Image (cartoon, rainbow, N blue to C red):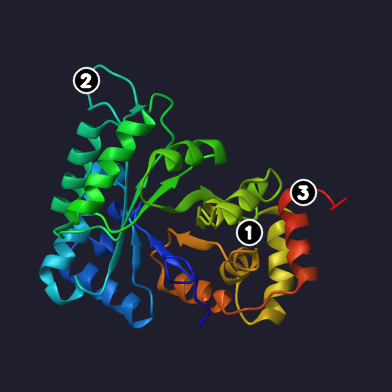
């Protein structure tokens, strides 16, 4: 199986954003069984954020781990925070908060809901235009030194945003999680992909299936044509396309379907040709490669 050489040492991360919507997995035993089957496939990384289901997704996952304690040492957990949503019926607006008080409370809340003592990776979820880089760096370092967080990264950051934080930080940022897919290929042409490679940040790709739009229009037709000869379906081809990019981005797959996860894994082992890669790029962008 292909593996990444970054901190997130897996071809595929499983995203938990829609866990609350999976009625068949809302009982701890059922979710624990599902997690166990993923571990058997070699998939141990699970991506969380405190705003997913307003914390409910973390609670469900934590209940599953509590029901099967032997799973705790086998799973690898990603947490994200700094997006603040107003409480229902309360005044206020959505905003970002990278203050020490908020981040410490957020990490403690995530650890409590998950029922674990440490996150394997903690990401700032969005760049905060009011961030004090020095103050944010100090609290991130304290979280590392306390053992509550093993590694640090960012999400949705542009190069100068992560470089400003890195300049103030005594530890290395290890990754940036950004949107990247056949329908969102801009990071391959605006310098972000190259900047991450240059700065040594592993690329985690959220929404790799383009929010359910993967198989629409000409792109869907092209995926169907290639799948007949590739030995995997559209999901697998989308993963193979991402893994062909220099640095081997790690897709964060939000699907809970065992069939789609198996297809995704098959695609991670597919060595896509340059010709097929550009054919899919062209179909996804809707215009010819100049």
Measure the alpha-carbon separation of dots 1 and 3.
13 Å
Q: Which residue is mark 1?
A: 215
Callout 1 touching callout 2 (CB < 8 Å): no
The foreground one among 82 and 253 is: 82
Secondary structure beneath label 2: loop
The dot on residue 147 is none
The foreground one among 168 and 283 is: 168
Residue 61, by quadrant, is bottom left
Name the residue: 17% across, 65% down.
Answer: 64
Number of the front mark, 1 or 3: 3
Q: Which residue is mark 2?
A: 90
Name the residue: 27% across, 77% down.
Answer: 36
Measure the alpha-carbon separation of dots 1 and 2.
40 Å
Q: Which residue is mark 3?
A: 286
Number of the front mark, 1 or 2: 2
Secondary structure beneath label 1: loop
Give residue 159's position: percent from left, percent from top.
56, 41
Measure the alpha-carbon separation of dots 2 and 3.
43 Å
Callout 2 touching callout 3 (CB < 8 Å): no
Give residue 27's position: percent from left, percent from top.
17, 63
Name the residue: 19% across, 70% down.
Answer: 72
Give residue 33's position: percent from left, percent from top.
24, 75
- Which of the two discs, 1 and 2, labels the residue nearer the N terminus? 2
Q: Residue furthest top?
A: 91
Specify few, some or many for label 1: CA neighbours under 10 Å numbering under 14, 14-19, or 20 or more: some
Name the residue: 32% across, 35% down.
Answer: 136
Give residue 70's position: percent from left, percent from top.
15, 77
- Which of the two discs, 2 and 3, labels the residue nearer the N terminus? 2
């Amino acid at each position: 199986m292909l593996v990444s050489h970054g901190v997130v040492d897996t071809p595929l991360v499983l995203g938990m954003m829609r866990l609350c919507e999976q009625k068949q997995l809302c009982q701890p035993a059922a979710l624990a069984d599902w997690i166990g089957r993923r571990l058997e496939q070699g998939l141990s990384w699970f991506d969380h954020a405190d705003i997913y289901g307003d914390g409910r997704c973390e609670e469900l996952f934590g209940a599953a781990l509590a029901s099967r304690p032997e799973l705790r040492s086998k799973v690898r957990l990603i947490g994200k925070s700094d997006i603040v949503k107003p409480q229902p019926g309360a005044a206020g607006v959505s905003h970002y908060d990278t203050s020490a008080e908020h981040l410490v409370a957020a990490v403690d809340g995530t650890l409590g809901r998950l029922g674990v003592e440490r996150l394997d990776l903690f990401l700032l979820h969005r760049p905060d235009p009011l961030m004090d880089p020095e103050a944010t760096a100090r609290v991130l370092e304290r979280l590392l030194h306390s053992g509550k967080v093993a590694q640090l990264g960012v999400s949705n950051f542009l190069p100068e945003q992560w470089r400003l934080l890195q300049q103030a930080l005594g530890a290395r940022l290890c990754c940036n999680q950004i949107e990247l897919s056949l329908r969102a290929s801009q990071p391959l042409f605006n310098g972000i992909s190259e900047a991450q490679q240059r700065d040594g940040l592993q690329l985690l790709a959220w929404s790799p299936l383009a929010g359910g739009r993967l198989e629409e229009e000409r792109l869907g037709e092209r995926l169907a044509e290639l799948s007949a000869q590739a030995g995997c379906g559209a999901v697998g081809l989308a993963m193979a396309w991402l893994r062909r990019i220099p640095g081997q981005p790690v897709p964060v797959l939000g699907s809970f379907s065992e069939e789609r996860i198996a297809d995704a894994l098959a695609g991670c082992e597919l060595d896509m040709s340059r010709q097929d890669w550009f054919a899919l790029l062209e179909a996804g962008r809707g215009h010819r490669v100049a």
